[in-house]
Image (tube, rainbow, N blue to C red):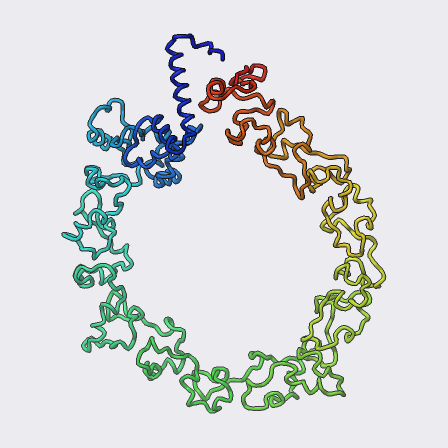
């Protein structure tokens, strides 16, 4: 083999190349010696021991490094350091706020021994100093505002070790006041009685400086509660501020039960604020007309009527009173319930014996037309004194007229909704219009058809379908093969009369190009028109010159205008661009077998060139890493960190020559190298 032009015999550079070749040859030969030999090679090539925390990763370089990828180490770092990965993704924490982050190894450089410091980057000026001194200096310069917890006021004067305990991660520190100051709260503080939100009263400037605004709580102090004579302990016994009751009764129960203060002894419930105010306990604000749903009128407002006359129960709020007349005056009801319980329809609050004229129009059945005729007596409808039991439907009173043969009734066949056709003016005239009152307008011959021809059973119970096939199934000459939408072709004027032309464009298969002139029978061989398949191959399989080797989706290349007019670009329509010698290969050289659907092939070189692989698979299936598509024997000069020409000469036995393509050179510039 030729010596490289830059290396002269006896030079230092030549000796370095020979040493490198020897190391590479020894390392590569060790790969074939099994797992133990592989570990030995990595030990030889390793620049040094990892720190104690990374020691388990020394078993394989692949635990931290990715070959041929500069940023691959960072990807491996964040797989283990998940907290830092989350900070970077969310742009939070120290690592998430670094603007020019660079690579992990720029600050955290390993392979310097088990006890090495890799937590932060050491400046050139600090190299050689004591490890603890370097750490202390780094902590002084560290900007805490870059973290999720900026230091303010008194916190800026505290040593790092006060919060960040030894052998713990910097991020594993309390972020709440009580996390650090719980012992202060237990010894001299509130002993947990005020909860854990210290910042609600204390500040970071000085712990003893406190502030508290009672108006920002759920119970702002107003009027008598805000009096300076009222001490905190009157409500907050034993310094227990949390969960103090905020309702009146909880504090003033003793006042309600005190006979001297004329309390209610719990009879009026616990909602003291309904009547009393916080200005003065004796001042009442209750107004029955305003504060209840039952204003007092006339005799109810009489001063002689006491509260207890109606509120006879033990507890006013628990035992709600009904607001109906009958609830209190049932014993006064002379009708004994026959008129129902709505006394106010006839009686008034001025006097029980005073009644007013009854207005039937205010009921659910106002009297109209013939019903309002003076000849129609009340007892004609109201058979008993319980007036509300009178039927409100036409059929309830006029059933006998419907069943009477002399009056030509329907005998219940047309249902009980008499008002659909009849009116209260006169029973005989009808107002029913099939076109207006139903969803099925009568057209053509349907207009002269008798009702009973379609409505065979009960008019309302037996609902008729409004599809043609529901009545005309026996007339269907297609025997169901054309579906049940007869109206698409037929008309109501005459069953034999059909529409002029069927519009194929309204179907799922509009006719385009040459399909427009094709006779229907060419595609629809039977009367089952909907069974015709829409795929091109279903009709044109005999014309397929590709014999399905390019798939069965003809429309991907062809169109309905002309079978010969096709358009397909392998570079634009697929993920496999044809370049080099691929551009001249016949389609069937790759697409050899018929396939159903789209013609999909694997894109790996080895899938087609497996038999051409002179390496026997030892270099993997990614041929494109070394070879190019312009010529199989042409290989790249450099792959990652490897130069193929010296490596091929050093490691392989003599084989036919290969041409090595120099970096940034064309095929004509390639040089032949013995393999």
| Up-down relation of residue 367 to residue 142 (above or below) | below
Q: Is residue 384 left or right of residue 443?
A: left
| Up-down relation of residue 619 to residue 91 (above or below) | above
Identify which residue, 670 or 412, lies in the foreground: 670
| Up-down relation of residue 413 to residue 209 (above or below) | below
**Res 575 quadrant in image:** top right
Q: Position of residue 135 (x, y in %)?
A: 22, 31
Identify which residue, 456 or 44, lies in the foreground: 44
**Res 470 quadrant in image:** bottom right
Q: Is residue 125 left or right of residue 292?
A: left
Q: Position of residue 132 (x, y in %)?
A: 20, 31
Query: Residue 231: in sight, yes or no?
Result: no
Q: Position of residue 54 (x, y in %)?
A: 31, 35
For image coordinates 39% across by 21% down, the residue present is: 23
Q: Position of residue 207 (x, y in %)?
A: 18, 46
Q: Is residue 388 left or right of residue 521?
A: left
Query: Residue 531: in sight, yes or no?
Result: yes
Q: Is residue 354 left or right of residue 319?
A: right
């Amino acid at each position: 083999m030729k010596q490289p032009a830059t290396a002269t015999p006896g030079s230092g550079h030549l000796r370095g190349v020979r040493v490198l070749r020897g190391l590479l040859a020894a390392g590569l030969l060790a790969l074939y010696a099994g797992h133990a030999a592989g570990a030995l090679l990595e030990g030889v090539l390793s620049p040094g021991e990892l720190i104690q925390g990374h020691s388990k990763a020394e078993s394989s370089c692949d635990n931290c490094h990715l070959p041929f990828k500069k940023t691959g180490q960072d990807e491996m770092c964040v797989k283990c350091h998940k907290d830092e990965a989350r900070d970077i993704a969310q742009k939070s924490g120290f690592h998430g706020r670094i603007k020019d982050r660079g690579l992990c190894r720029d600050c955290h450089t390993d392979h310097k021994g088990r006890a090495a410091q890799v937590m932060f980057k050491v400046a050139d000026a600090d190299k050689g100093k004591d490890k603890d001194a370097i750490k202390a200096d780094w902590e002084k310069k560290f900007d805490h505002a870059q973290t999720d917890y900026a230091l303010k006021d008194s916190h800026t004067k505290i040593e790092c070790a006060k919060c960040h305990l030894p052998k713990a991660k910097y991020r594993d520190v309390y972020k709440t006041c009580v996390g650090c100051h719980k012992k202060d709260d237990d010894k001299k503080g509130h002993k947990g009685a005020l909860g854990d939100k210290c910042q609600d009263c204390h500040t970071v400037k000085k712990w003893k400086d406190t502030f508290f605004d009672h108006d920002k709580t759920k119970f702002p102090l107003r009027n008598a509660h805000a009096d300076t004579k009222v001490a905190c302990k009157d409500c907050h016994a034993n310094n227990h501020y949390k969960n103090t009751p905020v309702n009146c009764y909880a504090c003033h129960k003793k006042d309600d039960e005190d006979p001297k203060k004329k309390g209610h002894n719990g009879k009026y419930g616990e909602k003291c604020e309904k009547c009393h105010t916080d200005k003065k306990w004796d001042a009442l604000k209750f107004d029955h007309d305003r504060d209840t749903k039952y204003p007092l009128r006339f005799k109810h407002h009489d001063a002689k009527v006491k509260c207890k006359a109606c509120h006879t129960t033990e507890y006013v709020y628990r035992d709600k009173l009904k607001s109906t007349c009958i609830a209190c005056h049932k014993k006064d009801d002379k009708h004994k319930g026959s008129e129902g319980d709505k006394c106010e329809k006839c009686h008034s609050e001025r006097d029980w014996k005073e009644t007013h004229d009854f207005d039937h129009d205010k009921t659910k059945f106002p009297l109209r037309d013939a019903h309002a005729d003076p000849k129609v007596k009340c007892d004609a409808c109201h058979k008993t004194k319980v007036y509300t039991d009178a039927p409100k439907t036409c059929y309830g009173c006029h059933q006998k007229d419907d069943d009477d043969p002399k009056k030509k009734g329907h005998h219940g066949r047309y249902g009980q909704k008499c008002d659909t056709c009849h009116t209260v003016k006169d029973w005989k005239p009808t107002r029913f219009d099939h076109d207006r009152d139903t969803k099925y307008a009568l057209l053509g011959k349907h207009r002269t058809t008798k009702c009973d021809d379609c409505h065979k059973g009960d008019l309302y119970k037996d609902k008729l379908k409004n599809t043609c096939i529901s009545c005309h199934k026996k007339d269907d000459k297609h025997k169901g093969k054309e579906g049940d939408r007869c109206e698409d072709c037929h008309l109501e004027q005459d069953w034999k009369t059909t529409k002029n032309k069927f519009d194929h464009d309204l179907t799922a298969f509009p006719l385009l190009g040459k399909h427009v002139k094709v006779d229907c029978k060419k595609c629809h061989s039977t009367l089952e028109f909907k069974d015709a398949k829409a795929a091109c191959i279903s009709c044109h399989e005999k014309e397929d010159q590709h014999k399905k080797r390019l798939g069965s989706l003809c429309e991907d290349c062809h169109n309905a205008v002309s079978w010969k007019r096709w358009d397909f670009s392998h570079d634009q329509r697929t993920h496999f661009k044809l370049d080099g010698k691929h551009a001249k290969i016949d389609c069937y050289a790759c697409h050899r077998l018929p396939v159903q659907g789209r013609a999909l092939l694997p894109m790996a070189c080895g899938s087609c060139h497996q038999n051409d692989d002179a390496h026997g698979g030892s270099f993997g299936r990614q041929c494109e890493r070394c070879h190019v598509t312009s010529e199989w024997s042409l290989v790249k000069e450099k792959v990652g960190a490897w130069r193929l020409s010296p490596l091929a000469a050093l490691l392989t036995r003599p084989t036919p020559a290969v041409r090595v393509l120099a970096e940034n050179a064309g095929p004509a510039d390639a040089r032949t190298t013995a393999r």
